[in-house]
């Protein structure tokens, strides 16, 4: 955060005002200082309890844990790494060596070691101070799901898909016990506070207790109606909490093996549960994207922590119990204040991620495409939903209006493009031919053609009136994520994972130019004269669209453009507003005529912002884009 403030302090100040909760006195007093925002995004009424978001992993985060002194967090990810963070949010180590997804990480009681488990069938030990690997414990025959140190740090117990728990001596790396008895995968294992017992959770719907000195089973805890994902002892060892696919957390008396509480309230399966250091609270992490807090003595729910945009895989308390850290498949770790656990409103419509948004030609509607297999129509004047287009059998990747606004074309993971009548919401065509996911579709300027871009490495052309395929454009060597027609409809530009943009002649169905971009382009549009492509990453000159007289000069000033990148709203290639984590786009759309922006965020929100650019400071109204010859961008978004 410090570096962002140093690079663009004024823009961060504007953003802080814009996204501060409605009840904030700072917002009430100073929001008038940004008069060029004429429609503000809807924000929370009060501050969330979220403190930090730790970003750096490139894959799902499967677990997170505090070091014993509370100064470090270790996170395990499907990017095959364990990462170490300090609690200010800074990354301070990357532990590399696993050859498969890392499923869990845990600190030794003295904090000097980290143990991590992997799909690569190994348990690895690391020095937390240096990040160096100090042991590879081989012996498991299947995926190792989790590991835990004994209270004295002399043993590690590792749970495996081979239906066993294995015990290892941390000083020698030798195996010293195999706990057998479960009839399906063992999902987790944990030592009691005195180290005398191990509790193991399994897909056989049971939790089993074991004597660590003998390796013998001494209890079976039965009651769950589905897989048990994790089990944990209370700090005094008198209770076990188990989390299950049956959407409950159950509490058990370890001396009798009897069930003494059912914590119900989650709407999806519960991945993990953990006691607070004083044993008074239980935190449970769920596929419902939430962490819930419970009073362990009464079983009553006392807080819901919302903010993650995908399932929460684990949660853990800090050693002093004041913080909760949660790990999620949205690739982030979030820290929460456990004493408040405040719930704040979220604007919801789609039940899944929103993949794209687009304005109708008259600006009166927005269409949004979602993972819940629907396209939704929204009234831009009110922000209210005014239609749901149903018919796709899988995720909808994008949607686009026809030039006259009468049709919507939607591209889907079900390998089809579907056409819809916007006045009735009825499906009026299914365009079949792609053999893999269709990422985007676009109408030609006259509305007679549709071009679709697919993971099958092709762009296909369709007659919008009949739905018949009338061309296949082949040449890309990786998935094609977007396509766009030139203003006269004679060209199609396509952008691909092969890091090229290709220009195609729509009549001859041939490639006429290949531009190497060195980056993957997701958003493109032709300039009005067809001489260059505006992209969210900059501007590309197109040789093939120039007059036969050779390279004519570009205009000295490029068209003013409003864009949204990963972290910024930009205007005229200059940063306007920094986007906080919860407001960053999964996709966005711009109405250039009305200067209205719609963002579908990674936290399931659809927000509208409108601007009066005549009120902007003069520095934003003049572009300073250097013209660069060849395949490079003419200009990139600057500070």
Image (spheres, rainbow, N blue to C red):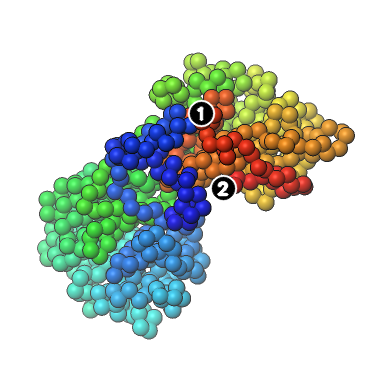
Q: Give coordinates of residue 67: x percent, y percent.
A: 32, 68
**Vertical placement of residue 205 versus 72, above or below:** above
Other-residue count near label 1 (Cα within 10 Å), few / some / many at <14 / 14–19 / ≥20: some
**Vertical placement of residue 442 versus 543, above or below:** above
Q: Does any portion of residue 346 appear in the rendered image?
A: no
Q: Give coordinates of residue 449: x percent, y percent.
A: 68, 24
Nearer to me, 290 or 103? 290
Nearer to me, 194 or 94? 94
Q: Residue furthest right?
A: 549
In what quadrant of the picture does the N terminus appear?
bottom left
Other-residue count near label 2 (Cα within 10 Å), few / some / many at <14 / 14–19 / ≥20: few
Q: Give coordinates of residue 241: x percent, y percent.
A: 21, 58
Q: For the point 13% across and 61% down, which residue is it?
A: 253
In the rendered structure, the answer to whether residue 103 lies left or right of residue 632 reads: left
**Vertical placement of residue 614 versus 536, above or below:** above
* Disc ID at residue 612: 1
**Which badge, 2 or 1, is on the more N-terminal residue?**
1
**Mark 1 element type:** loop
**Mark 2 element type:** loop
Question: Can you identify the residue that label 2 sits on?
Answer: 639
Nearer to me, 435 or 424? 424
Q: Does any portion of residue 284 appear in the rendered image?
A: yes
């Amino acid at each position: 955060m410090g570096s962002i403030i140093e690079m663009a302090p004024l823009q961060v100040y504007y953003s802080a005002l814009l996204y501060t909760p409605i009840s904030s006195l700072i917002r009430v007093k100073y929001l008038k200082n940004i008069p060029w925002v004429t429609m503000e995004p809807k924000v929370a009424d009060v501050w969330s309890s979220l403190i930090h978001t730790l970003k750096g992993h490139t894959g799902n985060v499967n677990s997170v844990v505090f070091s014993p002194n509370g100064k470090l967090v270790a996170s395990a990810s499907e990017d095959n790494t364990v990462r170490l963070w300090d609690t200010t949010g800074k990354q301070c180590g990357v532990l590399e060596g696993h050859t498969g997804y890392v499923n869990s990480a845990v600190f030794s009681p003295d904090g000097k070691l980290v143990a991590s488990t992997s799909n690569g069938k190994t348990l690895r030990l690391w020095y937390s101070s240096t990040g160096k690997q100090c042991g590879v414990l081989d012996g498991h025959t299947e995926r190792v799901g989790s590991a835990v140190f004994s209270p004295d740090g002399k043993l590690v117990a590792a749970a495996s898909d081979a239906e066993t728990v294995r015990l290892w001596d941390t000083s020698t790396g030798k195996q010293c016990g195999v706990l057998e008895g479960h009839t399906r995968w063992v999902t987790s294992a944990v030592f009691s506070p005195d180290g005398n017992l191990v509790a193991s959770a399994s897909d056989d719907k049971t939790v089993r207790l074991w004597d660590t000195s003998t390796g013998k089973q001494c209890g079976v805890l039965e009651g769950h109606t589905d897989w048990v994902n994790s089990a944990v002892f209370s700090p005094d060892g008198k209770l076990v909490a188990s989390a299950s696919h049956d959407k409950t957390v159950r509490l058990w008396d370890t001396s009798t093996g009897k069930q003494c509480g059912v914590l119900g309230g989650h709407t999806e399966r519960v991945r993990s549960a953990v006691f607070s250091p004083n044993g008074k609270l239980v935190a449970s992490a769920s596929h419902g994207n939430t962490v819930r807090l419970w009073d362990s003595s009464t079983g009553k729910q006392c807080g819901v922590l919302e903010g993650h945009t995908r399932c929460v895989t684990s949660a853990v308390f800090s050693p002093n119990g004041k913080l909760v850290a949660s790990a999620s498949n949205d690739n982030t770790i979030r820290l929460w204040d456990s004493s408040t656990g405040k719930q704040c409103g979220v604007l919801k419509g789609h039940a899944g991620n929103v993949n794209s948004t687009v304005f109708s030609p008259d600006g009166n509607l927005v269409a949004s495409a979602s993972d819940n297999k629907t396209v939704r129509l929204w009234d831009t004047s009110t922000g209210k939903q005014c239609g749901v287009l149903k018919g796709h059998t899988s995720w909808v990747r994008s949607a686009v209006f026809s030039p006259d606004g009468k049709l919507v074309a939607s591209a889907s993971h079900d390998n089809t493009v579907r056409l819809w009548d916007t006045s009735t919401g009825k499906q009026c065509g299914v365009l079949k031919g792609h053999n893999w996911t269709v990422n985007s579709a676009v109408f030609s300027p006259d509305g007679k053609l549709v071009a679709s871009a697919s993971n099958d490495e092709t762009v296909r052309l369709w007659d919008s009136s009949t739905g018949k395929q009338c061309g296949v454009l082949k040449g890309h060597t990786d998935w094609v994520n977007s396509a766009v027609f030139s203003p006269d409809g004679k060209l199609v530009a396509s952008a691909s994972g092969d890091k090229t943009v290709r220009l195609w002649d729509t009549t001859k169905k041939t490639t006429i130019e290949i531009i190497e971009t060195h980056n993957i382009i997701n958003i493109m549009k032709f300039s009005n004269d067809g001489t260059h492509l505006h992209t969210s990453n900059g501007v590309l000159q197109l040789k093939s669209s120039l007059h036969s007289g050779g390279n004519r000069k570009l205009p000295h000033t490029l068209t003013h453009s409003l864009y949204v990148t990963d972290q910024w709203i930009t205007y005229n290639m200059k940063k306007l507003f920094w986007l906080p984590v919860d407001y960053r786009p999964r996709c966005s759309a711009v109405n250039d005529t009305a200067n209205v922006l719609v963002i579908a965020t990674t936290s399931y929100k659809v927000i509208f912002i409108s601007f009066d650019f005549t009120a902007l400071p003069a520095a934003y109204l003049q572009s300073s884009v250097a013209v660069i010859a060849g395949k490079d961008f003419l200009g990139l978004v600057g500070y």
